[in-house]
């Protein structure tokens, strides 16, 4: 029986290590806004920093003219493995004319600040296809989201992100759930404060056309409550629409989505097909991300 030389054994060992590492490699979901509103779990690599301008718009109420845009200016950093931090400033643009139960307003205003901390708690592996991240974002706001009137508010968004690779380098899936309790002034009587909360559930599937272009389909369920904990619902809505992510350069990426409300229900008008008391006919996002490293 032929004997292997020392060099032969070394070569065999190197090949075994190579094969093992190749088999152990786990496909990942890109850590970019490929899903639309829905956020993936990847927080980046330590030392990475970035800036983003996120513009979330809302269009249409039951009558009249209604346009609202919330702009978020965010600086972020991955400061340790699986840890990400960000600080943000907000601005609000509201145009409301002849909308039932809303005063006419045409205003651009500073809308507060926020701080966010995210940690990926479950990593993908050869035996576990799912990755999971948790995030908390406390925020101080100055403008009422619906009416556009001045009103102080304090809230915190508690977020759960989950994603998976369905087809390596081609198809990806993600799911988010966000609970946001809030204490806020009544914009019509600023001496009175009230409690409320919201729940967001979203899921999306993204398809990779090329290394620089993804398309996605996303659906979101939004519910509004008159209590801090989600007990007394005042309305809910479901949105559905396409999303696009485009990597313009190695450092700059663009994400956009447009989603009409497809069904909903308001406790104020339970017989109607849509909830236009608490939500809008359509919502959209346009976001630019710039990577520093």
Image (cartoon, helix red, strand yellow):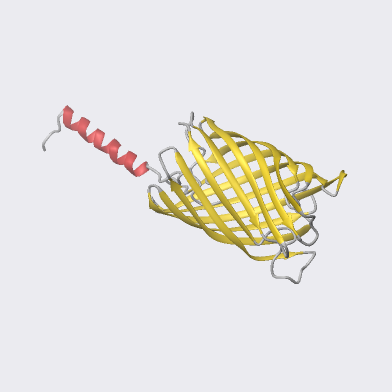
**Where is residue 281 drawn, in percent x and y?**
65, 62
Left or right: residue 47 compared with residue 155? left
- Residue at the (57%, 37%) spot, across then down: 119
Q: Is residue 181 visible?
A: yes
- Residue at the (57%, 47%) spot, across then down: 161
Q: Is residue 182 above or below residue 6?
A: below
Quarter of the rendering occupied by the N terminus: top left
Quarter of the rendering occupied by the C terminus: top left
Left or right: residue 131 compared with residue 23? right
| Numbered disc total | 0
Q: Is residue 38 visible?
A: no
- Residue at the (70%, 46%) spot, across then down: 180
**Where is residue 271 drawn, in percent x and y?**
75, 72
**Where is residue 136 drawn, in percent x and y?**
65, 39
Q: Nearer the viewer, residue 109 or 242?
A: 109
Q: Nearer the viewer, residue 17 or 162?
A: 162
Q: Is residue 46 above or below residue 31?
A: above
Left or right: residue 197 compared with residue 206? right
**Where is residue 118 drawn, in percent x and y?**
59, 37
Q: Determine the residue located farthest toward the bottom in the rendered image.
A: 271
- Residue at the (50%, 48%) spot, across then down: 255
* Quarter of the figure with residue 251: top left
């Amino acid at each position: 029986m032929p004997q292997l030389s020392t060099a032969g054994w070394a070569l065999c060992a190197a090949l075994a290590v190579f094969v093992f590492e190749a088999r152990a490699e786990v496909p990942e979901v890109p850590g970019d806004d490929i899903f639309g509103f829905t956020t993936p779990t990847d927080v980046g690599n330590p030392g990475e920093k970035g800036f983003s301008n996120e513009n979330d718009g809302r269009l249409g109420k039951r009558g009249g003219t209604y346009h609202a845009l919330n702009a978020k200016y965010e600086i972020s950093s991955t400061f340790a493995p699986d840890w990400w931090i960000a600080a943000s400033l907000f601005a609000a643009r509201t145009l409301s004319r002849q909308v039932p139960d809303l005063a006419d307003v045409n205003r651009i205003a500073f809308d507060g600040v926020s701080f966010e901390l995210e940690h990926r708690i479950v990593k993908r592996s050869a035996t576990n296809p799912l990755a999971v991240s948790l995030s908390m974002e406390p925020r101080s706001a100055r403008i009422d989201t619906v009416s556009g009137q001045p009103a102080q508010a304090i809230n915190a968004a508690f977020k759960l992100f989950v994603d998976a690779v369905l087809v390596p380098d081609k198809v990806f899936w993600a799911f988010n759930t966000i609970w946001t309790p809030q204490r806020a002034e009544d914009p019509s009587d600023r001496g009175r404060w009230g409690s409320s909360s919201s729940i967001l559930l979203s899921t999306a599937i993204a398809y990779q056309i090329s290394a620089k272009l993804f398309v996605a389909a996303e659906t979101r369920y939004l519910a509004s409550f008159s209590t801090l904990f989600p007990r007394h619902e005042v309305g809910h809505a479901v949105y559905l629409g396409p999303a696009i992510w485009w990597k313009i350069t190695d450092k700059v990426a663009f994400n956009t989505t447009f989603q009409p409300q497809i069904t909903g229900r308001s406790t104020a008008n339970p017989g109607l097909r849509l909830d236009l008391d608490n939500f809008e006919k359509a919502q959209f996002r346009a976001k630019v991300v710039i990577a520093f490293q």
